[in-house]
Image (cartoon, coloured by chain):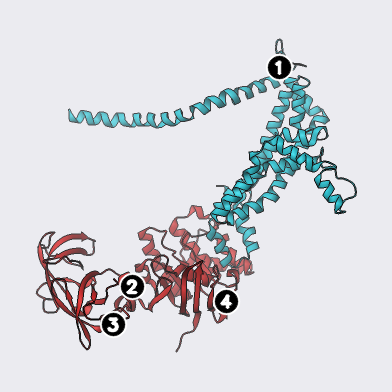
Chain colours: A cyan, B red
């Protein structure tokens, strides 16, 4: 009798425990899972489906022909190709500006006391509290031909005629970089916090000057943060719509803006869907290659 | 022949805000010795090491390394080697590159570099692992590589900042002897910081006991253990049983102290640890180390000066020895003993007689 009970306990408990262990986390992520599937995965699949339908206008898929014509058209048209290239170029500029401006801030945060650090963090994220439209109109006023920046530069005699800051690539990069700088700073700062401070001491005691220590120890060890920050800023820049519209207008036709016009103005849903997927795939491929290059480099060990 | 002084610390002080971390430290470290800075946390031992390393700058006082004044010289120009508690190997470099780091900065040629690295790794018994990354090594192996990296540049001074405290007990013991062997082989002057008294006693040529930003005593391990100069040193090193009494008489060379159970003990003035002389009727602390207390038997009964009847209250088996705690009969006093052999009559609750020699007792003024 007693033996029996023990035997059953042994055989049943692990299975029950396994089920329990699996069930509770599954329940916890269920709401999110439902949300993501219904509002992200399904629409994305629908757009993918649309992109392979060759109709001139609207969403009428009756008697539709399935083909890759939308994609072929895109790559045959130099206007769209140059728009794609412009999008990539502007995203790369934005990443570079964010990196150059953001790294020193992240480094300062990593070297500061906890108190100073949280104060800087607050400053860094504070622009995110303001709507992107409001922020862009702020820049708008500053960058106008007779705006503050041009007035100051001309008043100082640095330039003779106003610079074309608004409705140009410069304006878009300024707008995007100011919007996404916090992401870059926080990503790099996080990886700098994780560097054991005694590594810098070890480098110094072995004879490396502070600059050398930065170049050979701190910088390589912050590569994970740099990669995270740059891919994040690059991805969101590639798909940015509001800032290029407001700061660039018709002068800077980046792919998201062009796609929007295709769908909302010309009602070419299926062609617009193909364009969306081309933008998505391009972004993914560039990010993939970029991270692979870092991982395969001699600093690959940092990423493990 | 007088040995050369490698590190000369003269009156160094340092404060963080209002707290004085170091209070005018004077210390001379001889060429080739392994000197340990030992003390409880916050005593200033790590601060002292960081000042020698150049990571902290003293507020006052002079520091000379090999006769050169080091005030305001940054750490990367001091030509030192250091091993840290957290190993601090560069995670993005192989073992070889970690060792090559300092050599490249010293512009050592490729062939000489290979040879030096091989020799260093052989010294720490880690050759063959040049291409491994630190992550692929165990804690003990990492610390060996860290030692090799510190030694490969042939530093004027090797600094060890609690290098063993992140390792498990067995490894710690193993590396302790290893470090001693390597230090002997290379002959590099070494400053070792630890809070572990066993490490300090077993490895050091000399020990510096620090407390509250001051040096309490400098001496060889045996001097420190057997002839502590202050009550702090005595209580910090080794364990002891404390008894309370009152000073009843001051003689030429001794003090007579009466314990709570009316027992009077006469202890030599040489064993008095406090600075200021005590006065009559002042409360006095008496100390005896566990290994100097014995169970009474035929062979030692004539040698022990103090004998007390007691009951055994606790027995801990330590493998090589027994740790026994006894309760003195008729007094609120427990006494600890460490003994190799325990006869079969000694059990918890059994009545025994314990004793010790008066010359082993240390006394001091009660702090209150």
Could you tell me which chain the residue with mark 4 belongs to? B
- Between circles 4 and 2, the one closer to the viewer is 2
Name the N-terminal-most of marks 4 and 2. 4
CA–CA distance between discs 4 and 2? 32 Å
Could you tell me which chain the residue with mark 3 belongs to? B
Asked if the residue at tag 3 contacts the one at tag 1, i.e. Cβ–Cβ closer than 8 Å, the answer is no
Q: Provide the secondary structure element on which disc 4 rests.
A: loop
Q: Position of residue B249 (x, y in %)?
A: 19, 83
Q: Are marks 4 and 2 on the same chain?
A: yes
Residue underneath mark 2: B232
Residue underneath mark 3: B277
Instruction: Name which residue lies at 76% across and 20% down.
Output: A268
- Between circles 1 and 2, the one closer to the viewer is 2
Q: Are marks 3 and 2 on the same chain?
A: yes
Question: Is residue B239 in view from this perspective?
Answer: yes
Q: Are marks 4 and 3 on the same chain?
A: yes
Say if A129 sits above or below B147 in the image: above
Q: Are marks 1 and 2 on the same chain?
A: no
Q: Position of residue A235 (x, y in %)?
A: 67, 37
Q: Provide the secondary structure element on which disc 1 rests.
A: loop
- Depth check, front residue: A179 or A51: A179
Residue underneath mark 4: B70
């Amino acid at each position: 009798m007693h033996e029996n009970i023990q035997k059953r306990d042994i055989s049943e408990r692990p299975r029950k425990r396994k089920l329990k262990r699996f069930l509770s986390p599954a329940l916890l992520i269920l709401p999110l899972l439902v949300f993501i599937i219904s509002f992200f995965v399904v629409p994305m699949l629908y757009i993918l489906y649309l992109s392979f339908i060759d109709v001139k206008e609207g969403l009428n898929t009756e008697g539709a022909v399935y083909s890759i014509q939308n994609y072929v058209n895109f790559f045959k048209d130099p206007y769209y190709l140059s728009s794609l290239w412009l999008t990539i170029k502007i995203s790369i500029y934005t990443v570079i500006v964010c990196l150059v401006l953001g790294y020193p801030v992240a480094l300062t945060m990593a070297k500061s006391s906890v108190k100073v650090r949280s104060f800087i963090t607050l400053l860094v994220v504070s622009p995110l509290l303001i709507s992107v439209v409001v922020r862009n109109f702020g820049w708008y006023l500053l960058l106008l031909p007779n705006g503050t920046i041009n007035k100051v530069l001309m008043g100082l005699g640095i330039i003779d005629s106003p610079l074309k800051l608004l409705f140009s690539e410069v304006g878009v990069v300024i707008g995007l970089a100011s919007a996404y700088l916090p992401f870059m700073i926080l990503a790099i700062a996080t990886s700098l916090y994780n560097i054991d401070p005694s590594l810098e001491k070890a480098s110094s005691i072995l004879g490396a000057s502070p600059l050398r220590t930065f170049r050979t120890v701190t910088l390589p060890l912050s590569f994970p943060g740099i990669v995270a920050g740059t891919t994040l800023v690059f991805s969101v820049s590639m798909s940015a719509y509001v800032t290029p519209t407001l700061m660039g207008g018709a002068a800077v036709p980046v792919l998201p803006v062009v796609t929007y016009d295709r769908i909302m103005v010309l009602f070419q849903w299926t062609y617009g869907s193909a364009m969306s997927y081309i933008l998505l795939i391009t972004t993914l491929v560039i990010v993939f290659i970029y991270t692979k290059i870092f991982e395969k480099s001699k600093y690959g060990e940092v990423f493990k | 022949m007088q040995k050369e002084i490698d590190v000369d610390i003269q009156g160094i002080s340092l404060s963080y805000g209002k707290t004085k971390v170091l209070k005018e430290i004077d210390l001379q470290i001889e060429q080739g010795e392994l000197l340990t800075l030992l003390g409880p946390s916050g005593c200033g031992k790590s601060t002292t090491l960081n000042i020698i390393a150049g990571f902290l700058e003293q507020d006052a006082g002079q520091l000379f390394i090999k006769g050169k004044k080091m005030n305001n010289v940054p750490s990367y120009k001091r030509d030192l080697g250091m091993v840290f508690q957290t190993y601090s190997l560069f995670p993005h470099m192989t073992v070889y590159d970690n060792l090559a780091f300092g050599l490249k900065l010293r512009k050592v040629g490729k062939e000489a570099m290979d040879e030096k690295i091989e020799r260093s790794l052989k010294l720490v018994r880690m050759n063959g692992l040049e291409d491994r990354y630190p992550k692929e090594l165990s804690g003990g192996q990492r610390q060996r590589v860290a030692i090799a990296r510190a030694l490969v540049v042939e530093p004027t001074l090797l600094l060890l900042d609690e290098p063993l405290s992140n390792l498990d007990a067995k490894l710690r013991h193993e590396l302790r002897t290893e470090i001693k062997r390597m230090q002997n082989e290379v002959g590099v002057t070494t400053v070792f910081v630890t809070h572990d008294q066993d490490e300090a006693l077993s490895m050091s040529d000399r020990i510096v006991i620090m407390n509250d930003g001051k040096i309490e005593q400098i001496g060889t391990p045996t001097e420190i253990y057997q002839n502590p100069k202050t009550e702090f040193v005595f209580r910090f090193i080794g364990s002891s049983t404390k008894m309370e009494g009152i000073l009843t008489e001051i003689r030429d060379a001794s003090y007579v102290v009466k314990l709570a159970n009316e027992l009077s003990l006469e202890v030599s003035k040489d064993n008095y640890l406090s600075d200021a002389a005590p006065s009559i009727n002042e409360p006095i602390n008496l100390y005896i180390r566990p290994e100097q207390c014995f169970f009474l038997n035929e062979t030692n009964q004539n040698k022990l000066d103090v004998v007390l009847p007691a009951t055994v209250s606790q027995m801990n088996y330590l493998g090589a020895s027994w740790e026994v705690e006894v309760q003195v009969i008729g007094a609120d006093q427990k006494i600890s003993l460490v003994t190799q052999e325990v006869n079969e009559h000694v059990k918890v609750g059994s009545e025994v007689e314990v004793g010790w020699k008066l010359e082993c007792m240390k006394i001091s003024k009660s702090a209150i």
